[in-house]
Image (cartoon, rainbow, N blue to C red):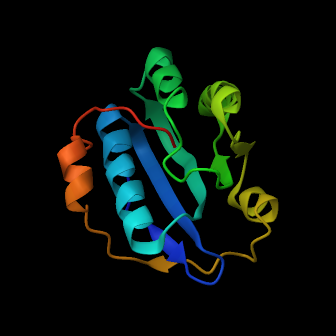
Amino acid sequence: MFHPFTYDEQHRTYLARFSGTLTPQDMAAFDVAVHACRALHGLTEAVVDFSDVASVDVTTEQFIARAKQPQIMTGQKRALVANGMLFGMMRLYGTYQSMAGLEPMIVHSLAEAYEALGLPAGDFHPVALHAPAAVSSLGLESDAPASL
């Protein structure tokens, strides 16, 4: 399940969280939110937290296809938090991302993610994001791949 974004205004960083079963639909909802965040705040850094994901319905092939897509927040640092099997999948994702741009930092905890991005303990607050017309016209509410 994809949860609503929170945002740290001072450090221009968003926090996205996933829990339960990670699905292609969750990833598509995330993509829409990232585009909306970019439209609202411009380019920002990211913490994407998968630590509460218990199972994954996204195939290795789907992760690789995502990794080959251009980064939505072009050139911005990203820390991906993952555990267990998903940690390995994110490392694979990072390897493919490094071929086309800035490789995300893959870490085991939010504390490590904050440290990697030079953030304090995290001053994230809910933010209302609405998909801009350009995002809707891209069809990103479907299974269209994009990069984390």
The answer to whether 40 appears left or right of 118 in the picture is left
Q: Is residue 1 visible?
A: no
Please tell me which residue is depicted at 42% across the width and 37% down the height of the picture: 146
Quadrant of the image occupied by residue 122: bottom right
The answer to whether 29 appears left or right of 139 in the picture is right
Q: Nearer the viewer, residue 96 or 27?
A: 96
The answer to whether 29 appears left or right of 61 in the picture is left
Q: Nearer the viewer, residue 142 or 23?
A: 142
Quadrant of the image occupied by residue 83: top right
Image position, residue 51 (x, y; %) = 59, 48
Please tell me which residue is depicted at 46% across the width and 73% down the height of the picture: 41
Q: Residue furthest top?
A: 61
Image position, residue 147 (x, y; %) = 49, 38
Q: Is residue 104 above or below residue 40?
A: above
Image position, residue 21 (x, y; %) = 39, 38
Q: Nearer the viewer, residue 124 or 40?
A: 40
Q: Is residue 61 visible?
A: yes
Q: Is residue 10 above or below residue 96?
A: below
Please tell me which residue is depicted at 67% across the width and 52% down the height of the picture: 79
Give the number of callouts: 0
Q: Residue furthest bottom?
A: 10
Please tell me which residue is depicted at 30% across the width and 32% down the height of the picture: 144
The answer to whether 21 appears left or right of 118 in the picture is left
Quadrant of the image occupied by residue 114: bottom right
Image position, residue 70 (x, y; %) = 51, 37
Q: Nearer the viewer, residue 138 or 53?
A: 138
